[in-house]
Amino acid sequence: MKPIRFTSLVLTILVILSVSLRTYAQTDKIISYIVDTKKQDLQLYWKDGKGQIIQNFDNLKNYVASKKKKLVFAMNGGMFQPDYTPCGLYIQQQQTIRPLVTASGSGNFFLKPNGVFYINNNNTAAICTTPDFSNDKKQVKWATQSGPMLVIDGAIHPAFKQGSANVNIRNGVGILPDNKIVFAISKEEINFYDFAEYFKNLGCKNALYLDGFVSRMYLPEKNLSETDGSFGVIIGVSTF
């Protein structure tokens, strides 16, 4: 009977590890968090009920607590202007707060193609390039625009170069083959190609860059409670 008990113990450990890896995917350079929008409450935040910009994770924790909920994950959700206004499209609870930006310009946001991360009314998440985004039927509940795209239809952005010396802290979002969302942040400076390759290796057909050195992740279950920093849009997952 001892071998049977030992085998059962090993199988139990393997199952626990498998579940853990599905929720948290970590490498030496990158930590990520996986969200199932069919089961978890993911929202985008910018201003509170009084019209004040939330701006940081501490304020978001307090705001969520005022709704009788607990913040379990947060990450900055796209580039912003000096006054913390989103640089591009921002949709909150089906309301278009900031319009889609299709113009050209300088900086990472305008490194075409850029794109949009959004969640529909049926809680299905998606990422697409800016030209492909449409909300004609008002089916989008949450959306944030950023750039550049990291992975486009399974291919790494053509402007990225292997071995590039352009390194920085980076964060982004991708859609996994099972339609769950993976949010990732680099723990050390990394170039665009390597960061995009991380999402591609996870099986993401599309992934979007969110921001650079300002990026932070709040994930207390993994002892990651970066409450410094100031942001525009913040992506958060909360629970009752």
Image (tube, rainbow, N blue to C red):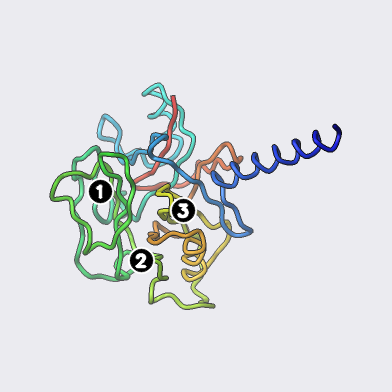
Disc 2 marks a residue whose amino acid type is Asp
Residue found at x 42% / y 55%: 174
Q: Which-is-in-front pick, marks 2 and 3?
A: 2
Q: Image quarter for residue 87?
A: bottom left
| Kind of element beneath mark 2 | loop
* Figure quadrant of the C terminus: top left
Q: Which mark is residue 79?
A: none
| 139 lies above or below 176 | above
| Kind of element beneath mark 3 | loop
Residue found at x 57% / y 43%: 224
- Whichever of labels 2 and 3 marks the residue nearer the N terminus, that label is 2
Return the x and y of residue 77 as percentages of the image width and height. 37, 49
Residue position marked by numbered label 3 in the rendering: 215
Cα distance, mark 1 to mark 2? 23 Å
Cα distance, mark 2 to mark 3? 25 Å
Return the x and y of residue 212 as percentages of the image width and height. 44, 60
- Whichever of labels 3 and 1 marks the residue nearer the N terminus, that label is 1
Return the x and y of residue 30 as percentages of the image width and height. 56, 57
Residue position marked by numbered label 2 in the rendering: 153
Q: Which-is-in-front pick, marks 1 and 2?
A: 2
Residue position marked by numbered label 1 in the rendering: 90
